[in-house]
Amino acid sequence: MLNIGNLNEVKNKTVRTNSYKIDLKNFQTIFILLGMIVLLSILTPAFLQVRNLMNVVRQVSLTAIIGMGVTMCIITTGIDLSSGSVVALVGVVAASFASDQYPLIVSIIIGLAVGALAGFINGSISALGGIPPFIATLGMMLAARGVALILSDGKPVTNISSSFEFIGGGYILRVPVPIYIMLLCAVISHILLKHTRYGKYVYAIGGNQQAAIVSGINVKKYLIMVYTFAGIMSAVSGIVLASRLSAGQPTAGVNYEMDAIASSVIGGTSLAGGIGTIPGTIIGALIIGVLNNGLVLLNVSPYVQQVLKGVIIVVAVLIDKRKKR
Amino acid sequence: MLEMIKISKEFPGVRALNNVDFRVRKGTIHALMGENGAGKSTLMKILIGLYKADSGEIKFNGELVKFQSIQDALNAGISMIHQELSPVPYMTVAENIFLGREPRHKNSFWVNDREMERKTVELLKQLEISIDPREKMLNLSTAYMQMVEIAKAISYDSKLIIMDEPTSAITEKEVEHLFRIIKWLKSKGVAIIYISHKMDEIFKIADEITVLRDGELVDTVLSSQTSREKLIEMMVGRELKHLFPKEEAQIGDVILEIKNFSRGKKFKNVNIKVRKGEILGVAGLMGAGRTEVMESLFGIVPPDTGEVYINGKKVNIRSPQDAVKHKIGFLTEDRKFSGLYLPLSVKDNMSIVNINNYIKTGLINHKALEDDCNKLVEMLNIKTPGLDQIVNNLSGGNQQKVLIARWLLINADILILDEPTRGIDVGAKAEIHRLMSNLAKQGKAIIMISSELPEILGMSDRIVVMHEGRLTGELSRAEASQENIMKYATGMVS
């Protein structure tokens, strides 16, 4: 592979790296999560009940899935604000094809395609048009919501087959299906980021876009791919949500993008680019989910929950910055 | 008027100034000359309060002064026109000139726009600069921006004005205009320190000339009592220390040829040939267009006209991807800006360009990649705790080695190294020189852009010199000397 000419015998010092292991040392947030779980278990017995934990993880799965796509955007120093609206749009579209008339696979494929298209538009506008991703996805956030309302005429799209309902409401081996979907997405996303050329390029573009250009990376192409993937992730979440609600709600998904971004950032993704992981994002989503759940169980007002959510994001990032010094 | 006595300044690893004496008399135009890195900027930055000298003192108008900030210098009557123009683009000319000291309505919070405009008009009129004070800076040409910058420095009513390469961005007509302004200032008793590489201008306008070299004062002479040749001798004449003797390499056929390369105002009609096993030094002053030529060769900014031939065959390079396909590597001038992925690991920095070679059925073969990276770490003697070390934490020299490793990983046949030893300590410099020598021995063609004459002379088999976008000279290793390179670089011989 490497033909370095007539140089002296090089001793192969195998400095093995952590490419195949998930480097737990970096995930100090996992301790925050564990700490919270311990604390809540003490404060309220209802927390540790299997049913409750399943609920939490199932709820978290929606945010986590979106978070995986957003994490890739943020790694490239971009962002995706349109996730929540795409969730609604895809929900409406998928629900429209989810009746007994069509095979289940049709609604899923169409739903994913719509998400991919939205993401593709986001990526193209920002990479080719030179418009900051913040603005491009902001526009999509507004427009996609509008399209969802138009297509559904402002009303929820019902008439859902039971096979479609299984996606969001079913159980396999006593575990809710959305959790399996989240794990599947997590594995795929993680492999993409850490074990493919695509992933390396994503980190490179975020690490130093100019250097990426000089390295011969087609920056525009990969940025479009990143946003398209984010759109697909939003679509997955949209399908799962529509399934759970048994309807395509044009008003669904509001603020989902905020939770997704928060999960990603708490999980260690840096807004400056070049840094971020899938496991981290999932932990971030769990922290928010556990926090929400715990506060509900403790009968804390939802308004206070909101405040605490905001505080936790800032605190988590502060701790991360301190650690990096 | 100004006395800088025995000024010394050290930065980690580098002695920027060593006991420099610098005196400027009232009402004179005093030129400050020297190569890149001679210490001119550092000396001036100490004068205006940006840096603090490690030792020595400064007397202004007979009094001992210690400037803690630029504001102190301004208040004392010293202002500076910087080489790098940094106006506020969305503000008007008037606002830029009076930035930070806007005239206010009697003692109130509000800025007196009318008064500001009036003063600007008066100032511009005095200097015979015809610009509308309400024009936004970004709408001005670079030349006019420079004129505004000049007006701004003068508006401080300073007794001493430092001009750092004031004519780098303006045309001849404006240069004449500038000289008229300078002469007028001189008649008012203002002293001017004029930093420039342009011999013609210096002889036209300067009364006295001070030459610095390697952080030391060479001499201060009257312009009437010296000549271009003597100045060049003063600027470069030194023992060539820290030279790594380059080993003989077998120089083969021409592997790369650039014909008729031109790009707008950046460079015109550049023709270069490089052979296998050869180190071609590209010399010239800053702004000569060397980096721009290489950027075009590498496809970052394709040239307007010109052809590239590799091994005799014409090739089309419109993007860095194309260049990499043709086994060309480019170590950029500013590694932090366009070379390193600072938040990423050593491994990633080395391997990203060549990632395709390590992919099996869509997935990365980490073991093979790491093995090769480890080999390179060993070979180049890169000091790092491991392949996972974040590159930002390495020293400059090691960072540079990581980048060189990157291009070795693609088995590049042609390596463009732009200022390969800039900003690294002497030890690492020698290692990189040794590495270059080895690579040449292996038959690689190396194009080395450097602003350090000893490096050019020590490492190159052949040298081409550029001046203001054109190739002004070509010398073999035997023919070359610091003097004649400088001659070509300052445009004295075309």
Image: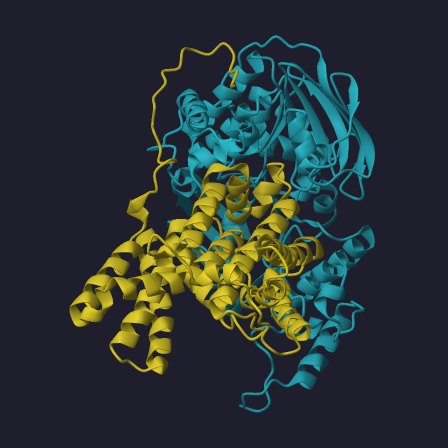
Chain colours: A yellow, B cyan
Residue A237 horizontal side relative to residue B330, left or right: left
* Quarter of the figure with residue B372: top left
User: Which one is in front, A233 or A137?
Assistant: A233
**Residue at screen point 51% across, 19% down:** A2
Q: Is residue B409 above or below residue A81?
A: above
Residue A225 horizontal side relative to residue B406, left or right: right
**Residue at screen point 44% across, 48% down:** A184
Q: Is residue B221 above or below residue B46?
A: above
* Quarter of the figure with residue B269: top right
Count of numbered marks: 0
Residue B196 percent location from the top left of the image? 65, 46
Task: Confirm whether residue B415 shows in the render.
Answer: yes
Residue B398 percent location from the top left of the image? 43, 32
User: Which one is in front, B121 or B302?
Assistant: B302
* Quarter of the figure with residue B153: bottom right
Residue B268 percent location from the top left of the image? 81, 36
Q: Is residue A22 above or below residue B419?
A: below
User: Which one is in front, A138 or B483?
Assistant: A138
The furthest residue to the left:
A42
